[in-house]
Amino acid sequence: MSAATAGRPQVVNFGCRLNIAEGEAIRLAVNGAGAGDMIVFNSCAVTDEAVRQARQAVRRSMRERPGAEVVVTGCAAELEAGRFAEMGARVVRNDAKGLVASYAPQEKNSASTSSARTGFKGGTSAESFALSLSDPKRMRNANGRPYQPALSGADHARAFLGVQTGCSHSCTFCATVLARGTARSATVEDVLASARTALARGQREIILTGVDLASYGDDSGTSLAALVEALLTLPVERLRLSSLDPDRIDDALFALLTQEPRVMPHVHLSLQAGDDMVLTRMKRRHRRADAVRLVERLKAARADIAIGADLIAGFPTESDAMFANSLAMIDDCDIVFGHIFPYSPRAGTPAARMPQVGRARARARAATLREANARRRQNWLDAQIGHSASMLVERDGVTGHAENFAAVMLAAAAAPGTIIDVRLSARDGDRMVAAPMQEKDIAA
């Protein structure tokens, strides 16, 4: 925490795109509460390492800004509320992170109850609060309020729009249902209103995100495909979807991904593993052949689609042969954007009670996956040299992303927030170097 931020509120986001979107709601709520010297950590708990980083950040902020009030919200706060409260932080649950009342100023040295630190009224102790958070039933109806869309701020050319939270599946490795409860969706009308806000402030690409995005609408009788169709009635120029469960890409969504030019040719799949026994023990709903066939169909219908995937290395009981099947998925599914991390046990999940392969082996396997993915990505980028692309220019005027999500750097600055046609001239590491195309080149 820099000295420049002392005396005024600061929001620090960890983790997923949904957290980034929800961070804007936190910022507005903090400002609405009239908070002064306050640091809000919007934490993540996808791995033990993510929780450790949140604890480390809290300790560092307390050393560097002893006069600031530290608030912790997000998934790590849900799972370790008592621990953060004992550190001296105010804990705000996920479903209250966007409420002004959660950040109302408190007397620094008052004899406040631990319920004040947790954002609850009543005499709830930090320990019992932590136990209540581990009960998914508590989260199911989220204070009786429907999920409100979370729209990121105007400081990026792209707008992250959270349309769904929670998960109703029971993957054995995941603590998300403990942290965010069962799946809940925003209404189509509320999502459209948020999208109009993003468009009105000049953001020309919208990225839909959620904890389990493909389950959007399960709780209200609609679907993700129906939401995308509704959004396309607006003047959205570029629409991108975040991670999708391969088991939930139905015919309607498949058609939009492959036939609608405003839906970007970039599909990120929640694969997690490439071995059927591991997938079974994870309680995933697809098998290896399903994922390979889906990618084959996607690429046959739209050849320029770029594939991303989540992969976990070192899941409990994973043998060398099982890992080899996951490693082969990099090539079998042409994965160029891998979100790869080593398995870490999450307390309260079934996988934590399975025979572990060990952290050192999990980390080594994750490194092997990342190396294979880097080679695949660089070969893919090399093949694009000399081709044209449409690029959304970020706020710095020199970086951005092509339609297929390839990172692009301009040789000379362009107007931030614009979409320009560029010629890809070279690869610089994991991004392409490009120059704007002249009108005669576009016409040709």
Image (spheres, grey):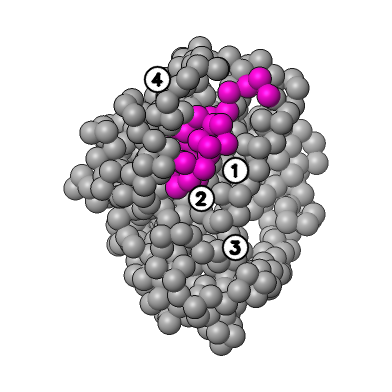
Residue wearing tag 1: 54
Q: Amino acid at mark 1?
A: Ala
Q: Residue furthest top?
A: 34
Image coordinates for residue 42, horizontal then vertical, percent: 53, 36
Residue wearing tag 3: 341
- Determine the secondary structure under disc 3: strand
Image coordinates for residue 376, horizontal then vertical, percent: 67, 69
How far separated are the C-alphas under marks 1 and 2? 9 Å
Q: Earlier in the sequence, mark 2 or mark 3?
A: 2
Q: Amino acid at mark 2?
A: Ala
Q: Please tell me which residue lies in front, 423 or 31.
A: 31
Image coordinates for residue 331, horizontal then vertical, percent: 59, 76
Q: Quadrant of residue 69?
A: top right
- Determine the secondary structure under disc 4: helix
How far separated are the C-alphas under marks 3 and 4? 36 Å
Q: Amino acid at mark 3?
A: Phe
